[in-house]
Image (cartoon, rainbow, N blue to C red):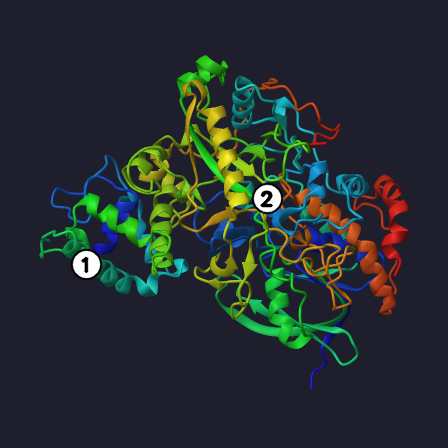
């Protein structure tokens, strides 16, 4: 749940069900969680899988410290990071990933894969993800490939000169 | 006791630097073995798939450093398989650069004039298309039109792409499925194989030592074919000549690790690294303004919305490539495609109070992904990169099964570099935000540092032993018989895509390698034609060869 809330901070989405706590509901449409961030992180290919429980514990500890620092009372029925309001989750992620933070690399890795789940569905074959209406690829408008799974764009050019060439261009098309 | 395998020439890496040297040496009669840390993929192996484990992640390496991250090829053919095939020559002033050492950083023997015949040799060997406007993608056309609107020129970029086969799928970084990109898999490498060279994939070279008879022993590990974090064995090969071409993010690491057995390395090994001054900006276009202001129309009701379509970079602005301007104020601005997954996390949303690379604003920005136009800056940086002590193996501690690792490069941009980036950022903004055409933001350097797809100069040529690891014929100072022919040999940022210059320097290095091989008893001659049999390039360089072969 804590890691879902982290992924939702990177690319926020709408709540999956009314009582959803991990997903804050800060943006319309599916976000990183709906896109499969946890599935991706739990795949050993990422190299992060073994440490996920520790990451969640560390993130909750940071959330407790953040809450104490800012005088926030947290709902104890959910993990501390989940209990943080969305804006504060974002502010804390900003602190953890800022240059100079000793654990920066770790939190950036987690953010990187959360983002990848949304913008490239790295845990799924891309054509399957598109066919399944993957929220990230769909929102970005990535087109459906040809039936053989490959993309081809027969129309690709405005087909006319759109600028003057640099006067010092060599016959081979390089800068002089 | 098993005897160690021996060969005449051992080439580390199969990218531009390795393939060019291997071809000429094999064609000249030497026994050549090439070791490649990545897999050997061709044609139908190249997938259109972002899933981890597809060709996209198998053939690429993303190494995160401290202040600089590098992207490089990790397969037979190296960078040529994953690159965008832009092949411009470096502008004349680049060779006169002084950079951080307050005197000319290139060897006195190399100028644009003396390198042009070698560029010609490359152009004869790798088919490079002089692109016309009808070849330019929508994104390139848009950049050209925006440049014209802002009173600038713009040029289609020469590229090693067969336009007849290209389908403008923009999957070049995963390898070309349609054999349109003229990678080394179609020229130097098959020609080297035809002359008896051997290529061994999934062999990651770790270190070099010296043998009792004055030759070299290269130690490698065998890499698991799916999970690169694992090794499946190790071995060694002895050779009389070593050609190192593992890429500028790996070659110096191998030499650093070899210092214990080879003895002290030149000071410049693992120093003076340049990221080719690279930096990215994202413009999110206002489609109505594209239509009204620039008069662009795709014919299907859309003005642009074509970020996904094309073949990498097709158009560049070269107005600042002017030798009369001061150093650190010259740069090119090139339209580029950058696929999702690898770097879009670094694109930052405009406005808002947070860092912009995550959150609600970033999601909104991704929703407009089709209207993105990415502009690639190549400024003159200050060769600030320094490699720390090598990791246990390879050039990084691998985090993921493929693609992602943590390296040892440290890069702290100087005021010169930061000012040049700021100047280029401002110019991109000026061009693209004019009259409300787009909103432009630079990619953040806060997450993985600066970011280069063209690592250079970490083991560079030069005349001064204190600031160059190699002499002007690419031989490692103090270690005769070891040559470096990849991007690490390039002295500094080039202000344009570097592949053509890396190739030309590798071609120019070959006569000196042949000379050294002959001195070590290898029966090899210099003078092979282009891989396809052409000889006009050879005629052009013939007058330059004797000086390069002189002892």
Where does the N terminus of chain B fall, quadrant-wise?
bottom right
- Cα separation between marks 2 and 1: 45 Å
Residue at the outermost front position: B102
Instruction: From the viewer's perspective, tell me whether residue B233 is left or right of residue B213.
Output: left
Where does the C terminus of chain B fall, quadrant-wise?
bottom right
Q: Which mark is residue B83?
A: 2
Residue B317 visible to an observer of this rendering = yes
Q: Secondary structure at mark 1?
A: helix
Numbered disc in front, either 2 or 1? 1
Instruction: From the viewer's perspective, tell me whether residue B398 is left or right of residue B479.
Output: left
Circle 2 chain: B
Where residue B425 appears, x then y in whole percent?
A: 48, 34
Residue A133 visible to an observer of this rendering = no
Q: Which residue is mark 1?
A: A65
Where residue B126 appears, x then y in whole percent?
A: 73, 41
Identity of the residue drawn at 36% across and 60% down: A48
B315, above or below A90, in the image? above
Identity of the residue drawn at 84% across and 41% down: B537
Q: Quadrant of residue B462?
A: bottom right
Where residue B263 appears, x then y in whole percent?
A: 68, 74
Using the rendered image, report if marks 2 and 1 lie on a common chain: no
């Amino acid at each position: 749940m804590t890691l879902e809330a982290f992924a939702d901070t990177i690319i926020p989405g709408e709540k999956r069900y009314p009582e959803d706590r991990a997903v804050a509901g800060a943006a319309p449409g599916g976000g990183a969680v709906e896109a499969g961030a946890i599935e991706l992180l739990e795949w050993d290919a990422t190299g992060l899988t073994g440490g996920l429980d520790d990451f969640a514990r560390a993130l909750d500890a940071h959330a407790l410290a953040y809450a104490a620092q800012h005088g926030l009372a947290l709902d104890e029925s959910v993990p501390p990071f989940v209990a943080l309001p969305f804006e504060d989750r974002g502010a804390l992620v900003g602190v953890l990933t800022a240059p100079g933070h000793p654990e920066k690399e770790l939190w950036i890795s987690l953010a990187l894969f959360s983002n990848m789940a949304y913008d490239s569905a790295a845990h799924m074959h891309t054509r399957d993800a598109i066919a399944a209406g993957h929220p990230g690829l769909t929102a970005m408008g990535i087109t459906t490939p040809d039936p053989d799974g490959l993309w081809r764009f027969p129309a690709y050019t405005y087909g006319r000169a759109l600028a003057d060439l640099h006067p010092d261009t060599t016959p081979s098309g390089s800068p002089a | 006791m098993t005897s160690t395998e021996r060969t005449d020439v051992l080439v580390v890496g199969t990218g531009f630097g390795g393939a060019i040297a291997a071809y000429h040496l094999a064609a000249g009669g030497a026994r050549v073995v090439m070791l490649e840390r990545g897999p050997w993929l061709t044609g139908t192996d190249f997938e259109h798939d972002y899933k981890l484990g597809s060709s996209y992640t198998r053939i690429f390496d993303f190494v995160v450093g401290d202040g600089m991250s590098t992207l490089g090829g990790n397969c037979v053919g190296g960078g040529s398989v994953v690159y965008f095939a832009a092949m411009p020559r470096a502008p004349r002033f680049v060779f006169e650069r002084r950079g951080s050492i307050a005197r000319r950083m290139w060897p006195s023997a190399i100028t644009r004039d003396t390198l042009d015949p070698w560029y010609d040799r490359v152009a004869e060997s790798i088919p490079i298309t002089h692109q016309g406007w009808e070849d330019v993608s929508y994104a390139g056309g848009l950049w050209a039109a925006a440049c014209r609107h802002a009173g600038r020129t713009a040029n289609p970029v020469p590229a090693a792409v067969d336009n007849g086969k290209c389908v403008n799928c923009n999957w070049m970084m995963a390898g070309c499925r349609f054999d349109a990109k003229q990678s080394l898999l179609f020229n130097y490498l098959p020609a080297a194989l035809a002359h008896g060279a051997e290529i061994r994939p999934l062999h990651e070279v770790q270190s070099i030592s010296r043998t009792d008879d004055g030759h070299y022993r290269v130690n490698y590990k065998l890499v698991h074919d799916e999970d690169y974090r694992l090794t499946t064995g190790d071995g060694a090969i002895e050779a009389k000549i070593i050609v190192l071409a593992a890429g500028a993010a790996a070659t110096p690491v191998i030499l650093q690790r070899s210092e214990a057995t080879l003895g002290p390395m030149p000071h410049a090994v693992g120093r003076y690294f340049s990221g080719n001054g690279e930096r990215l900006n994202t413009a999110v276009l206002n489609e109505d303004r594209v239509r009204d202001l620039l008069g662009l129309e795709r014919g299907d009701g859309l003005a642009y919305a074509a970020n996904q379509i094309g073949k990498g970079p097709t158009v560049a602005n070269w107005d600042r490539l002017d030798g009369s301007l001061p150093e650190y104020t010259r740069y090119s601005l090139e339209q580029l495609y950058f696929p999702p997954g690898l770097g879009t996390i670094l694109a930052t949303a405009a406005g808002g109070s947070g860092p912009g690379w995550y959150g609600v604003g970033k999601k909104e920005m991704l929703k407009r992904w089709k209207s993105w136009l990415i502009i690639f800056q190549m400024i003159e940086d200050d060769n600030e990169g320094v490699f720390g002590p090598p990791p246990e193996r390879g050039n990084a501690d691998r985090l993921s099964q493929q693609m992602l690792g943590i390296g040892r490069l440290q890069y702290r941009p100087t005021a010169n570099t930061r000012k040049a980036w700021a100047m280029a950022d401002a110019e991109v903004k000026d061009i693209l935000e004019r009259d409300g055409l787009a909103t432009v933001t630079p990619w953040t350097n806060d997450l993985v540092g600066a970011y280069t797809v063209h690592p250079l100069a970490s083991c560079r040529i030069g005349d001064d032993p204190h600031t160059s690891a190699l002499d002007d014929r690419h031989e490692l100072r103090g270690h005769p018989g070891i040559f470096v022919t990849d991007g690490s040999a390039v002295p500094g940022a080039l202000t344009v895509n570097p592949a053509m210059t890396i190739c030309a320097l590798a071609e120019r290095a070959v006569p000196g390698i042949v000379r050294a091989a002959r001195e070590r008893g290898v029966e090899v001659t210099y003078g092979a034609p282009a891989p396809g049999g052409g000889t006009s390039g050879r005629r052009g360089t013939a007058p330059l060869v004797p000086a390069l072969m002189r002892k």
